[in-house]
Structure formats: structure tokens, C-alpha cells
Amino acid sequence: MTKRLISNSKQWARTIKRDVHAVWLAARDPRTPWFAKVLAVVIAAYAVSPIDLVPDFIPVLGYVDDIIIVPLGILLVVKLIPPEIMNEHRETADEASERPTSRIAAGVFIAIWIAFATFLARMLL
């Protein structure tokens, strides 16, 4: 039972990782509707961003947001993208050995999160 649970969890994690990559690719595809692109970029940015709504160092709650927000966001984006486009990008993501990495993109995401946090702090104060 435990081995099966671990195996299923690992498969689920691989599927999420693949879909994050596929959603990222679909967001750059001109055939993808604009509203799906915007949501896809937000979800992909959140998935790869080192900044979370609840920091990971907080016991239990730190990982709950990652376990809930990312999969639900991916599910929503996948529903908004036409199936043929999503399947094409899933195949591309399967072929890739690892998700795309870019220090420039990471810097952009960090800058966006900092700007958002600053804006939110100014609104609340």
C-alpha cells in the first residue's frame, strides 16, 4: 500500500511538472486564446517562482499552497486551451529532459512579485 502511494505520488508530480512546461509552451502559442495565455503565464510563473503566497518554511501550510494552487491553476488553464494544442505541447514537454530554465526569466518573475508585494503593502498601509 505504501509503495503504491509513493509511486502514485511520484507519477502525479511528474505529470504536474510536464503540464507546467506544456502550459508554458501553450502560453507562447499564437493559437492559444489570450485569456488562457494570461492565466497560463501567471500559473507558470507561480510554479517556478521562489516566492510563494505562504513561505515554505512555515510547517505544513508552506507546502499546502503549492499543492493546491498550482494543480488547480493548471487544471483551469488546460480546460481553457483547445485540446489539440494542449496535446501537442504535452508531447513537446514529454520530449524535453527538463523544464526550461532562464536566469532572465527568474529575474523577471522575482521583480514582478516584488512589485506586487510593494503595491499591496502600499495599498494596505
Image: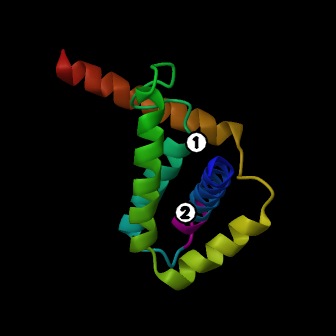
Q: Nearer the viewer, residue 50 or 60?
A: 60
The image quarter in which residue 77 lies: bottom left
- x and y, in percent, of residue 2 in the image: 63, 47
Residue 25 falls inside the magenta stretch: yes
**Which residue matches tag 2?**
23
**Which residue matches tag 1?**
48
Q: Which element is circle 1 on?
A: helix
- Above-or-below relation of 101 to 38: above
| Residue drawn at (73%, 67%) of the image | 94
- Above-or-below relation of 2 to 19: above
The furthest residue to the top: 125
- Above-or-below relation of 2 to 81: above
Colouring used for the render: rainbow
Magenta region, main secondary structure: helix
Disc 2 crowd, CA 10 A, few/some/many (<14, 14-19, 20+): many
Name the residue type under label 2.
Val
Residue 48 falls inside the magenta stretch: no
Say whether residue 119 is visible: yes
The image quarter in which residue 34 lies: bottom left
Say whether residue 37 is visible: no
Q: Nearer the viewer, residue 3 or 89?
A: 3
The image quarter in which residue 75 lies: bottom left
Q: Which residues are magenta?
A: 24-29
Name the residue type under label 1.
Val
| Residue drawn at (27%, 20%) of the image | 121
Disc 1 crowd, CA 10 A, few/some/many (<14, 14-19, 20+): some
